[in-house]
């Protein structure tokens, strides 16, 4: 076993002691290759360009980490729910590692304070925290391999931040459900803003869901997102009623 | 190292000698837990039900294998193309492990002859071969772990069946490109059949692509798929011309 709980020699000569310590606090080990972790926190808005024009930021690591996280989550769910079908497993994975959830997780882990980004643009990139979490998992995978990453993600993230039995009972967001349903059925789904009522802070939106160009349901709310959710919930209920006829 | 190149003891007592040998031929090793591999070839049309009503088929393994294959492919591309950005990596992965490609691969590997499905329904389930390949990778992962699976997938599938430099130059299908573009830009994309011309075997379709309800391009062909591709190629060209202005 490698002495991952000891400070590596290069710690003492590094200008990145803070990052070494932050990783130790988050994951319980000192990183081997600190440069990977530095890169994981380099948001594209703060990325630098090499002489060849290549941008140095965390997007490649995010691509890798996203895939590794999906695999680890799939394995965990497969083994945790031996009697559930693949529809259940897919839905559970959506609940655990969707974009909103990843942003929340990253915040709880304190990653937001580590990300280097152009601070003027932080509102523009709302998912920079979740992206950094994925990139961090990519860095961990390259540094320590799959097995080690698997253990860390399970113990320090999934089992640490989720009560899996509660997640089972959580309602998934209906918009995702409808989009997944449409993809499975090879149907086109569109969320149209068909009307806006009022103005200023009293403004409400009406969203209509169309399936293969036929209207299915409408929702009304003060935000487009809220109206979409309401329309999607109605659509979901209609589909289930029809299926039971 | 475990003696994976020797026949396991249970081989000699097994009624599954053919499957043992088939796996050896495909991957170069004898399976440990043969039941996993049997399950991988159990299509849902031939699946059995347990007393609890649970269907025994390869769909759970397919869910797992799909995620493992994505992770292995992401790792391979990340390391093979150190100077390419995540857009390139995402596109390359779509080219390597899309549904059509997986079906072709499975056929080349001879998996179609191993899948147990209700033969009357084989036309209805066109992707049963690619699904079985994913399930097989899931079985391999459970049987032998990530590292072993990674090696087998790289050596026996990716490097064996693909010339990676040729894949780089292959044009990806434009419909996928447009859908990915719309997802990235958070825009709604719709492919509408706006007209049909002629009838019988001379019938042609006109497809219009709408972005956020505004028409962008049209394509005309004897099949809906063909018309979609043509419309998507025109749309793609338009977007690139606009980007260069």
Image (spheres, coloured by chain):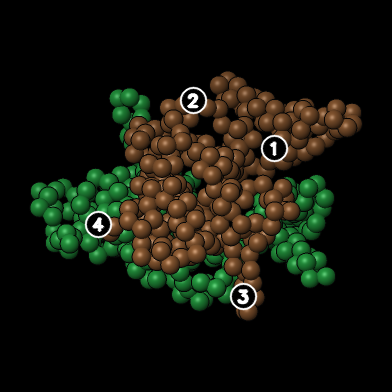
Chain colours: A brown, B green
Disc 4 or 2, which lies upstream in sequence?
4
Residue A67 appears in the figure: no
Q: Position of residue A209 (x, y in %)?
A: 73, 34
Q: Bin the neighbour count of mark 4 within 10 Å (Cα to Cα): few under 14, some 14-19, many 20 and up.
A: few
Q: Bin the neighbour count of mark 2 within 10 Å (Cα to Cα): few under 14, some 14-19, many 20 and up.
A: few
Measured in 3D between alpha carbons, the distance from the residue under mark 3 to the one under mark 2, in whole angstroms, is 48 Å
Disc 1 or 2, which lies upstream in sequence?
2
Considering the image in quadrants, where does the C terminus of chain A appear?
A: top right
List the residue tagged with mark 1. A211
Q: Position of residue B133 (x, y in %)?
A: 38, 54
Kindly indicate the quadrant of the structure image that contains residue A183. Answer: top right
A227 over A145 or under it: above or below:
above
List the residue tagged with mark 4. A1
Query: For the point 77% across and 51% down, which residue is it?
Result: B211
Disc 4 or 1, which lies upstream in sequence?
4
List the residue tagged with mark 3. A50
Disc 2 secondary structure class:
helix
Q: Which mark is residue A169?
A: 2
A50 over B218 or under it: above or below:
below
Q: Is residue A129 left or right of residue B195?
A: left
Do marks 4 and 1 share a chain?
yes
């Amino acid at each position: 076993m490698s002495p991952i709980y000891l400070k590596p020699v290069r710690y003492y000569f590094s200008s990145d002691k803070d990052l070494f310590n932050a990783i130790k606090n988050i994951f319980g080990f000192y990183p081997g290759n600190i440069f990977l972790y530095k890169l994981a926190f380099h948001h594209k808005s703060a990325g630098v360009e090499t002489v060849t024009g290549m941008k140095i930021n965390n997007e490649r690591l995010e691509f890798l980490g996203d895939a590794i996280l999906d695999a680890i989550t799939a394995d965990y769910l497969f083994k945790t729910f031996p009697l559930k079908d693949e529809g259940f497993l897919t839905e559970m994975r959506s609940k655990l590692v969707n974009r909103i959830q990843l942003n929340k997780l990253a915040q709880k882990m304190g990653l937001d304070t580590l990300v280097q980004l152009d601070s003027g643009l932080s509102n523009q990139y709302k998912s920079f925290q979740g992206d950094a979490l994925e990139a961090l998992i990519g860095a961990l995978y390259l540094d320590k391999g799959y097995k080690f990453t698997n253990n860390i993600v399970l113990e320090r993230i999934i089992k640490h931040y989720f009560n899996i039995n509660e997640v089972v009972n959580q309602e998934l967001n209906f918009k995702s459900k409808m989009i997944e349903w449409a993809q499975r059925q090879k149907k086109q789904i569109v969320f149209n803003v068909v009307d806006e009522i009022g103005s200023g802070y009293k403004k409400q939106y009406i969203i209509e869901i169309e399936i293969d160009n036929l209207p299915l349901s409408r929702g009304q709310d003060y935000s487009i997102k809220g109206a979409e959710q309401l329309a999607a919930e109605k659509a979901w209920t209609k589909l289930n009623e029809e299926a039971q006829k």
